[in-house]
Image (tube, grey):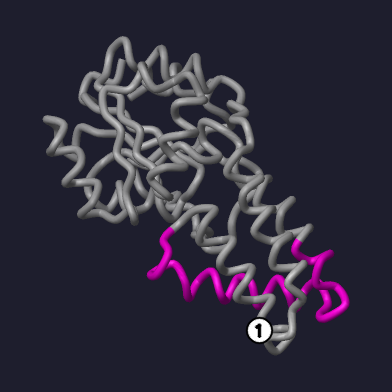
């Protein structure tokens, strides 16, 4: 089983548990609150632009998304957005921060199986407090040998993490739903990138599948991890 692999890392959001669908529900609430000021497609475009601008300021996660919604609401209303709407947007963000974790199919079995044989890591982007909350609620925390919450996932970041945990990219595998963050940079670093699609994909995380790369693998769901490791 994966005899040349010593470290297997998993992404968190939309790989082990649902995440994007709660953003979609909140964005629908955002559209409804501002429908008197702008049509839905324009609001979506303005919000996405704000999110892109603000990644460098706030990073990834619910808090940055909430601030981007407020910023967009101010922009489309020329600073005349009612205070009640701002209050609703803050409440929507708070609801997201309190939403219980829902594990994806095969998540517990996949991590539990891998952790018996390999050094198993969680590597995720996002707000530190929120990601720690979700990991604690998931019940998966004790299965990981290490947890890394980073501001960005790049080739250098992966190389540093794998080295810190006693390995190298060449003997490591990253499993995640984002081609841009979980697959491409790991392959660039010399590791294995395994794509497990969630079905809902944030526009900012979209990237072409690196189908020509020999260390790229695509799985239907996390249940495919065990047979994959027996083939590598």
Residue drawn at x 25%, y 33% is: 172
Mark 1: few/some/many CA within 10 Å (<14, 14-19, 20+):
some
Q: Which residue is found at the position 43% from the left and 55% from the top?
A: 180
Side of 28 relative to 204 (left or right): right
Q: Tell whether position 45 is magenta.
A: yes
Q: Residue at x 27, y 18 (%)?
A: 118
Quadrant of the image containing the N terminus: top left
Q: Position of residue 126 (x, y in %)?
A: 43, 50
Q: Is residue 31 left or right of residue 115?
A: right
Task: Choose between 16 and 138: the one closer to the eye.
Answer: 138
Residue 76 screen position, x and y as percent:
72, 83
Please tell me which residue is depicted at 63% across the width and 45% down the height of the picture: 96
Q: Secondary structure at mark 1?
A: helix
* Horizontal side of residue 101 vs 173, given as left or right: right
Q: Which residue is mark 1?
A: 75
Counting from the top left corner in percent of width and height, residue 38 is at 81, 80
Position in image of residue 197 (x %, y %): 57, 41
Chain part drawn in magenta:
30-59
**Along the line of sight, the residue nearer the viewer: 5 or 81:** 81
Q: Check the image and report above or below for 185 versus 130.
A: below
Residue 103 occupies which quadrant of the picture?
top right
**Main SS type for the magenta part?**
helix
Where's the C terminus, which quadrant? top left
* Viewer-nearest residue: 184 or 120: 120
Query: Which residue occupies the extreme front position in the image?
Result: 83
Please determine whether, in this image, residue 191 is positioned above or below residue 46: above
């Amino acid at each position: 089983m994966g005899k040349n692999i010593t470290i297997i890392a998993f992404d968190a959001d939309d790989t082990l548990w649902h995440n994007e669908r709660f953003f979609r529900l909140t964005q629908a609430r955002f559209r409804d609150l501002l429908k008197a000021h702008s049509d839905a497609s324009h609001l979506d475009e303005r919000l996405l632009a704000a999110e892109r601008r603000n990644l460098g300021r706030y990073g990834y996660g619910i808090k940055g998304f909430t601030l981007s919604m407020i910023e967009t609401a101010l922009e489309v209303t020329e600073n005349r957005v009612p205070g009640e709407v701002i209050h609703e947007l803050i409440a929507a963000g708070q609801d997201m921060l309190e939403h219980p974790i829902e594990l994806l199919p095969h998540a517990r079995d996949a991590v539990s199986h891998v952790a018996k044989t390999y050094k198993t890591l969680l590597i995720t982007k996002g707000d530190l407090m929120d990601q720690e909350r979700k990991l604690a609620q998931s019940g998966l925390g004790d299965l990981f040998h290490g947890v890394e919450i980073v501001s960005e996932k790049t080739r250098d970041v992966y190389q540093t993490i794998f080295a810190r945990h006693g390995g190298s990219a060449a003997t490591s595998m990253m499993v995640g739903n984002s081609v841009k963050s979980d697959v491409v940079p790991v392959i660039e670093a010399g590791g294995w990138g395994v794509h497990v699609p969630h079905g809902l994909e944030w526009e900012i995380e979209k990237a072409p599948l690196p189908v020509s790369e020999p260390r790229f693998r695509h799985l239907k769901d996390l249940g495919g991890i065990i047979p994959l490791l027996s083939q590598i």
